[in-house]
Amino acid sequence: MVDKITVVGAGHVGASTALGLAQRELARQVVMIDIVEGVPQGKGLDQWESAPIEGFDTRVFGTNDYADTAGSDIVVITAGIARKPGMSRDDLLKTNAGIVRDVSEKVRDNSPDAIIIMVSNPLDVMAAVAMRTTGFPRERIIGMAGVLDTARYRSFLAMELEVSVADIQALVLGGHGDTMVPLASYTSVSGIPLSQLMSADRIEANVDRARKGGAEIVGLLKTGSAYYAPAAAVVQMTEAMVKDRKRILPCAAWLQGEYGMKDIFLGVPCKLGRGGLEQILEVELTEEESAALGRSADAVREVMAALDALG
């Protein structure tokens, strides 16, 4: 257990994350901060009132003042807006970059030793914005993407094969979006290669569904996006670091030569421990997987270039 974890943003993702962190008792206190007065306070109080029933002692509270977040060990950034009718992608990118930049400045000033978990979209680019703003080393800025994407991939395979999700091992690399790279060659069911249990066309169908997993939920909800699974992914990453478990999880990390790439956040296998990102593992890829990872990196660079052009 650490002393304090802050969740920036009290929307569906932020609130679900705060509750998950508290229920696992990963910190003495969980602070939920938002610019809207009353919302984080109300949700924080509601969550704390569930403690006697759920049986956790982590103190949850909400605030609008970053002074209350001072000295946080971990900061989860979920702040940002969804694209609205009439808003261009450039408008969304510039707006969210401004929000993340402002939040990152406050994190740097109030919690200079914190580990940042980036959730705001476009995730890989927002992680880069946070790094530029805070000056934190790459070990302390990690993007939540691969854990969520891998969970979606595993859940779809479990449904089709009618097996427990616990028995499916998988790995999804690349940027968070349609260019993500589920690695069929590293997918197995209790050690049995997926190719022995599922036809190539069905594997590809599930890979495609994983790539579009977020959009599928948006299409069903119509007025929102996923939050239960994203929050669960953040909690798993946080637990790995707080408990120094040395978990190997796919996360967005700042590459410095790994996979032949440099100066880019991209989803890769990461060892997470108390120091944050402790190691990036390089796995062998097929030619097709390597090419797909390159295309995913190009897509991230394209968005990064668009942001730089906006100034």
Image: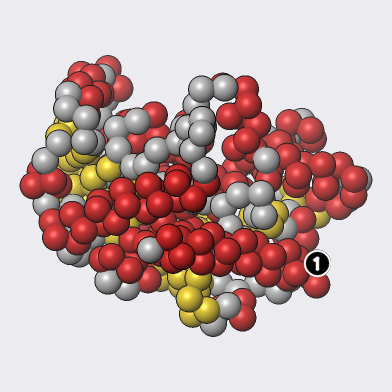
Residue drawn where x is 73% and y is 70% of the image: 290
* Residue pointed to by mark 1: 288
Mark 1 Cα-neighbour bin, 10 Å: few <14, some 14–19, many ≥20: few
Residue 73 placement (x, y as % from top left): 22, 55
Q: Which residue is more in the foreground, 154 or 252?
A: 252
Say what amino acid the circle numbered 1 marks.
Glu
Q: Secondary structure at mark 1?
A: helix
Q: Is residue 300 visible?
A: yes
Exactly how many numbered labels are in the figure?
1
Q: Which residue is more in the foreground, 236 or 287?
A: 287
Taking the image as shown, residue 232 lies to the left or right of residue 286, namely left
Residue drawn where x is 11% and y is 52% of the image: 70
Residue drawn where x is 23% and y is 25% of the image: 39
Residue 205 placement: quadrant: top right
Taking the image as shown, residue 303 lies to the left or right of residue 129, namely right
Q: Is residue 272 visible?
A: no
Q: How is the image coloured?
A: secondary structure
Taking the image as shown, residue 100 lies to the left or right of residue 93, namely left
Residue 268 placement (x, y as % from top left): 56, 64
Residue drawn where x is 73% and y is 39% of the image: 209
| Quadrant where the C terminus is found in the figure | bottom left
Q: Which residue is more in the foreground, 102 or 293?
A: 102
Relative height, residue 236 to residue 9 (above, below):
below
Residue 292 placement (x, y as % from top left): 73, 64
